[in-house]
Image (tube, rainbow, N blue to C red):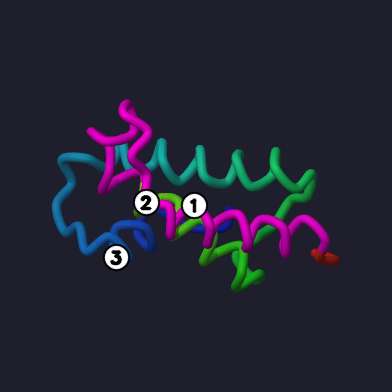
Amino acid sequence: MIVSLVEAKTWLKCDYEDEDSEIQLLVDSAEAYLQNATGKVFDNTNALARLYCRVLITDWFENRELMADSKTSDKVRFTLQSIILQLQYSTV
């Protein structure tokens, strides 16, 4: 596990439990996305992988209504693409 539910909620500044299942889905999806994109399995000891998942989770959580319109921030997309390339070519 790269990011726990508690860590994700702290990062999102979410102190209620109403959306725990949705946030857990985002956590699981971010980790799967990272593994599929890099072909590598990361854990919580890799700071860059943790940051990547946190940024992706935040973008998905905060822009849930925008995802259907593909209005994800270009800055976020560029940042995530840069991080994914670094992780892809790193030695876990």
Q: CA distance from mark 3 to mark 1?
A: 23 Å
Q: For the residues labelled 1 and 2, say whether their Cβ atoms are less than 8 Å apart.
A: yes
Q: Say whether residue 87 is magenta.
A: yes
* Numbered mark located on residue 10 in the image: 3
Task: Locate residue 87 relative to residue 90 in the image: left or right.
Answer: left
Q: Is residue 10 above or below residue 68?
A: below
Rate crowding at label 1 as few (under 14), some (14 to 19) or many (20 or more) other CA atoms within 10 Å: some
| 3 or 1: tag closer to the N-terminus | 3
The residue lying at 60 percent from left, 65 percent from top is: 44
| 2 or 3: tag closer to the N-terminus | 3
Name the quadrant containing residue 4. bottom left
The residue lying at 52 percent from left, 45 percent from top is: 30
Residue 76 percent across, percent down from the top left: 44, 57
Q: Which residue is mark 2?
A: 73
* Numbered mark located on residue 67 in the image: none
* Numbered mark located on residue 77 in the image: 1
Callout 2, which amino acid? Ser
Rate crowding at label 3 as few (under 14), some (14 to 19) or many (20 or more) other CA atoms within 10 Å: few
Residue 62 percent across, percent down from the top left: 26, 48
Query: Is the C terminus in the top left, top right, bottom left or bottom right quadrant?
Result: bottom right
Q: Is residue 82 above or below residue 5?
A: below
Q: Which residues are magenta?
A: 60-89
Q: Is residue 20 above or below residue 4?
A: above
Q: CA distance from mark 2 to mark 3?
A: 22 Å
